[in-house]
Structure formats: C-alpha cells, structure tokens
Amino acid sequence: MARMAGKMALITGAAQGLGAAISHMLAKEGAKVTLTDINAQGAADTAAAINAEFGADTAFSFAHDVTDETRWQEVLQAGHDAMGGLNVLVNNAGIGTIGSVEDETYDAFRKVQAVDVDSIFLGCKYAMPLMRDHGLGSIINISSIAGIIASHNYVSYNAAKAAVRHMSKSIALHGAKTGGKIRCNSVHPTFINTPILDGVKAMFGEEEGLAKLARQVPLGRVGDPEDIAYAVLYLASDESKFVTGAELKVDGGISAM
Ligand code: NAD
C-alpha cells in the first residue's frame, strides 16, 4: 500500500534540489503533487518528469514567488482545484547568504527573512483553511541545522531558520487547538548535495568542497536529497499522526556533538 495514497501535496521551491526530490518521493508513494517555484520552467520540467514516470495528472506546476501574498492565495487555490484538495504543504523554498552581522547588508538580511520566514507565515495562513476540508493535514517547514546551531558568518540564515523552527511550533499548537486535524513540524537538514552547495564546489572544486563539508559530519558524508525526502514522507503521511510541533534533525549526527 502506497504511503501517500489519496494525499494531495503542494511543495514550494520544487524546481530543483530538495523540493524536486520531495515532490518525486511523495508522488512515488501515491500522492498528487503541486510544484511551485519562482523558476516556473524548472517547476514545469520537474512536474513533466514526474508525470512521465507516475502517470498524467500526478503533478501540476505553477509560477510562484513565495514572498508574494496574493500569489500564495492564487497558487494554493489553483493547486487545490487541480489536485481535488489539499492535505499537505511543504514549505521548502529558501535562500541563504554568507556574512557576519558587520558584513551583511540590511537589504540582504531583509531578503533572506522574506523568502525563508515570511513565506511560511503566508503559506500556513492561507493553506490551513483549505486543508481543513480534506481529512488529516500536515505542514512541513524546511528549516536547517543552522536554525539550531549558529555560525559567525550566517547571521541572516541563522536568524531566519531559527524563526522557522519556533514559528512551526506556534502553528502546531494553533492546529491542535482548532480541531486537531492539521499538524505542523520542522525538518533540519545539514549539508545536502543540491545546487545550494554550488558556491562551495566552485570555491574548492567539487570533490574537495564536498569532502570539506563531510569532515564536519559524524556520519562522514554530505547528505543526499533522498535523505530529506524520506523524513518529509514520514511527516506528510498519517504514520506520523501523533507528531506535531517536533523538530526532525536529519544532520548525520552534527547536533549530537
Ligand atoms: P536550491 O537552491 O537547490 O533550491 C531552492 C529552490 O527555491 C530553487 O528552485 C529556487 O528557484 C527556489 N526559490 C528561491 N527563491 C524563491 C522564491 N522567492 N519563491 C519561490 N521559490 C524560490 O536549495 P535546496 O538545497 O534544495 O534547499 C531547499 C531548502 O532546504 C531551503 O529552504 C534551504 O534553506 C534548506 N536547506 C538546504 C540544505 C542543503 O545543504 N541543501 C541544508 C539545510 C537546509
């Protein structure tokens, strides 16, 4: 029995990287998926590949800037209508910058908060009323291990991902208080091999760049997108129906040190 049979999920930032892997995993387990991204062509291409593998009308895609309040309402409704409902929202789209509090510009700081934090406020605010109509609902917010462990030169990203962690708990408690049908949890990856690591690879060369990061991970490697997709699959499915307000660290042991 497929683990996501009958479920309908919207995933942001789904053109590439973790969003694409999560969309593929949920579709493989029987869900209908709506892929959104500011890179509309990338989202369309990923949706087409999913449909080619799992059948027509498994995946839909829409252009979506997650900082745009009006567009959130439009794509949630469009995804809901295309799939026949909405049970799962994966707030995955995110960006990061490198800079200490003295180096970072205020504009860069505000931009990271808008894409990583405001997006989750908007997505949850407008998805929850739609989700209540369709059985049990699950919201998964992709934070980072950087939301738990700080670095001297990730001031914007540390602030944003810590906000995602705590906001997820507030949303979880609200979901519990308003009928208990909608859960909300955060996922905290460490370094995962997606295009987000292109900068590190360009700086040190692919092999040495990944090796440098792997040396910081007790399990001795950088994660694969699938490692995160499996965690999201558990939280999205009803297997986790008693889990809300949790923070699932998928970090190869970094936070145990
Ligand atoms: P990625 O850069 O490969 O993909 C991010 C996607 O988000 C892209 O498709 C991009 O077009 C989209 N996006 C960017 N700004 C957007 C906007 N304003 N509106 C809509 N879409 C937008 O990154 P990834 O590694 O797949 O990261 C996905 C999530 O996982 C992010 O929230 C990131 O912070 C988090 N994360 C990643 C890692 C990692 O090492 N890969 C580690 C911890 C957390």
Image (spheres, helix red, strand yellow):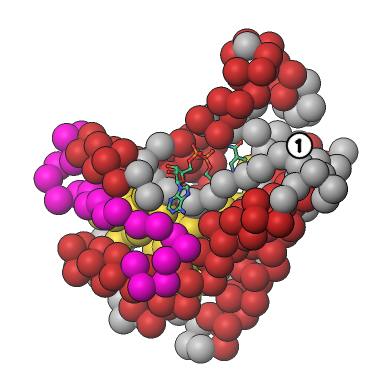
In-image side of 143 versus 62 (left or right): right
Magenta stretch contains residue 67:
yes
Q: Residue at x 51, y 88 (%)?
A: 178
Q: Residue at x 58, y 83 (%)?
A: 174
Q: Residue at x 14, y 42 (%)?
A: 55
Q: Quadrant of residue 222?
A: top right
Q: 154 or 249, which lies in front?
A: 154
Label 1 beta carbon less than 8 Å to ligand 1: no
Say which residue label 1 marks: 253
- Numbered marks: total: 1
Q: 179 or 105, which lies in front?
A: 105
In-image side of 141 versus 2 (left or right): right
* Residue lying farthest to the left in this orientation: 56
Q: Residue at x 70, y 68 (%)?
A: 166
As shown in the figure, which amino acid type bears the numbered disc 1? Gly
The crowding category of the residue bearing disc 1, from other C-alpha atoms within 10 Å (few below 14, some 14 to 19, many at least 20), is some
Query: x, y (%) of residue 65?
Result: 40, 57
Query: x, y (%) of residue 251?
Result: 69, 39
Query: x, y (%) of residue 38?
Result: 38, 50
Q: 116 or 91, which lies in front?
A: 116
In-image side of 29 versus 187 (left or right): left
Magenta stretch contains residue 234:
no
Indicate the secondary structure of the residue bearing disc 1.
loop
